Amino acid sequence: ALYTYIFHTVYPVLENKPINWAQSLMFVVESMTTVGYGWLLPFSNDLTVYLAIQIMISGVIMIFVVIPLLLAPYLTTLLAPAPPRKTPHVLSGHTVVMGYDELTRSVVESLTISEHDIVIIEQDRTIALEIALHYRKRAYVIWGDYTDPSTWAAAHIDKAQYIVICKDERQTASIVLGIRESVKGKIISIVDKLSFERYLRYAGADYVLSPKHATGRILARHAVLNPSGDAEPDIPGLDRININLNHAAEQELRLINIPVVFGCQAAFKSLFELRLFERFGIIVPFLWKAGKFIPEPRADIVVDNTTSLFLFGRAESIVTAIREEFNTNGCADAFAVVAGFGDVGASAYQELLSSGVSCMVVDSKVQAVEQVVGNAENEEVLKNALIEEARFCIVALNDDD
C-alpha cells in the first residue's frame, strides 16, 4: 500500500504521464513478484528506475526472508492436524485413562489386547497428537484439560466402567473430586507415594495404587518365593496362598499357584514322591521352574525353591495340602537386609515380615524399625547389619547410581 501510494504520487511528476490507482498497484505487484513490466517501460527518469529497483529488492526480501520466517510457521500451525476433542461416537462400559506416561502406556498396551474400548485424555497437544497417531483405531485419544467438565463429557466419563488417573497427587485429588458425583464406574488412582492413599480415598477414589509399593512387594516375593526365577504373575492365590473356607465352599474347585519355599516338607521332592493326587486328590496341570513354564510336568521333576506349582482341586483339599506340604514355617529362621527405607524399601520390608522373615534395615535416616543407620555402600555398615548372615538382601535406593 505504501509503495502504491508513492508510485502513484511520483510517477506523473517524474515521467510526465498520468497513472491511476489500479495501474500503480499493478506496477508494485509486478515489481515485488519480479514478473517484469509491460506498457510502462521505458522509464525516462533515473529516479523512477531507482524506485522500481527498491520495490523489487523489497519483494525479494519478502519472498525469501519474511514469508519463510514469519508466515510459514503460522500457516504450518494453522494447517497442522489437531488431536481429537471428542470420541467419534458415544461409548459405554469403556475405560478412561487420564494422563499418558510410561506407566499408563503399559496399562493401555495391556488393555488393547482385549476388545475393551479405551479413551486416553491428554492435556498436552503434542503428546495427544503423537499417541493418537500411535494407537489409531486401538484407542480413542482426546485432547483436553483434565479438570474441564467438557473434556469429561467428550470422553463419556459418566458411562465408563473404569477411570484410571495417573497424575500428581494434588491434580489427581482435584480430578477425583470433580468426577465422583457423575461417574458410576470405579475410580483408580495411580500415585507416586502411597502415603496419600487415605486422602485420595476421602476424595472419592475406589482404588489407590503405587508403582513403588508394588515394586517393593514384588522384590520381597521374588527373594522369598522364587530367588532364581522371574517374579510370578499376580494371579488369584499368590498373595500368601490363603483360602478362607468361610468364603469358599469346601467342595469348590480352585486353581492355586503355590511357590515352594525353603524349609517346607515338599522342598527337593519329586512330584512322584509328593503323590498329591493319591493323598489329596489334587493335580498339577503345569508349573514354573527356574523361570520356565512347564505344562503337564513329568512325575520325576524335583521341586525346589525355584519352583511354583499350580494346584487344581477342591478348596478343602488344597488347604490340607498347603498345611502339610507347603507351609512357610521354614522362613521363620530366615534373615534379610533391606538397604533403603523409602517407599519401595518400606513395602519390601512389610512383605518380608508378613512372610516370616526377620529384617534389618540400612538407611541414612533414623526409622522406626530395627536398623543400622549409615550408608549402604559402606562395608562396615553392612557388616554391622549382619549382611554375612542374611539369606536375602534387597537394595531399594532412589538413585540407581
Image (cartoon, grey):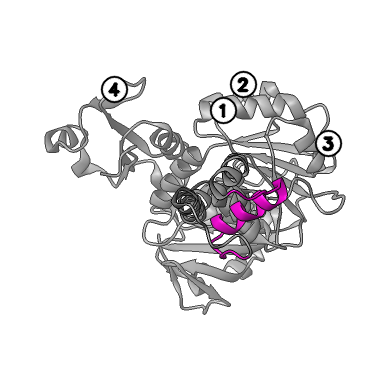
Whether residue 401 is visible here, answered yes or no, is yes
Callout 2 touching callout 1 (CB < 8 Å) = yes
How many numbered circles does the render carry? 4
CA distance for labels 3 and 4: 44 Å
Label 2 SS? helix
CA distance for labels 2 and 4: 26 Å
The amino acid type, in three-letter code, at marker 3 is Lys
The amino acid type, in three-letter code, at marker 4 is Lys
Callout 3 touching callout 2 (CB < 8 Å) = no
The amino acid type, in three-letter code, at marker 1 is Glu
Label 1 SS? helix
The image's mark for residue 184 is 3
Q: Earlier in the sequence, mark 2 or mark 1?
A: 1
Q: Earlier in the sequence, mark 3 or mark 2?
A: 3
Spot occupied by residue 71 in the image (x, y as percentages of width and height): 56, 48
The quadrant of the picture occupied by the N terminus is top right
Q: Earlier in the sequence, mark 3 or mark 4?
A: 3
CA distance for labels 4 and 1: 25 Å
Compared to residue 144, the image places residue 202 above or below, namely above
Residue assigned mark 1:
169
CA distance for labels 3 and 1: 22 Å
Label 4 SS? loop
Which is nearer the eye, 302 or 240? 240
Residue assigned mark 4:
365
Compared to residue 204, the image places residue 102 above or below, namely below
Span colored in magenta: 16-38
The image's mark for residue 199 is 2
Callout 2 touching callout 4 (CB < 8 Å) = no
CA distance for labels 2 and 1: 9 Å
Which is nearer the eye, 230 or 126? 126
